[in-house]
Image: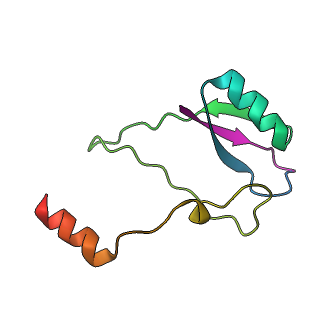
Amino acid sequence: MKTFLIDWGENCKGARFALIQAKDLHHAVWETDIIGSPFNIAELKLKRNEEEVRYLEIAQPEDVFCGVSILDAVEWKHSAEEIFRIWEGA
């Protein structure tokens, strides 16, 4: 499964950018077409920074046009204290 970034263009009704997972670009295009007509689609490839970490910042949209927002797509399972304990044990 690959992750693709969708750009709905500057005149979109919801968030300008979205993510979709699909087997390949062909499937991503067809599945995205069910939602609407994208301005552009690209495979998301996170580059590594100087410390070899892959990282991407994502803004939280105020209104969701389709699907869920980034915060609704996750289940927060770890508290800050738990994360710190994991970090200490590394």
Where 6 sits versus 64, above or below? above
Say whether residue 79 is left or right of residue 32. left
Residue 75 percent location from the top left of the image: 49, 65
Residue 34 percent location from the top left of the image: 83, 39
Where 90 sits versus 31, above or below? below
Say whether residue 68 is left or right of residue 63. left
Instruction: Answer whether residue 9 is magenta in the image.
Output: yes
Q: Nearer the viewer, residue 6 or 26?
A: 26
> For the point 73% across and 42% down, which residue is it?
7
- Write down the region rendered in magenta: 1-11
> For the point 77% across and 37% down, which residue is it?
32
Q: Nearer the viewer, residue 21 or 49?
A: 21
> For the point 60% across and 60% down, which residue is it?
70
Residue 62 percent location from the top left of the image: 72, 69
Any part of residue 89 in sight: yes
Q: Nearer the viewer, residue 7 or 75?
A: 75
> For the point 72% across and 55% down, which residue is it?
67
Where 6 sits versus 66, above or below? above
Among the 4 quarters of the image, the one containing residue 19: top right
Where 17 sits versus 62, above or below? above
Q: How is the image coloured?
A: rainbow
Instruction: Answer whether residue 80 is magenta in the image.
Output: no
Residue 64 percent location from the top left of the image: 75, 62
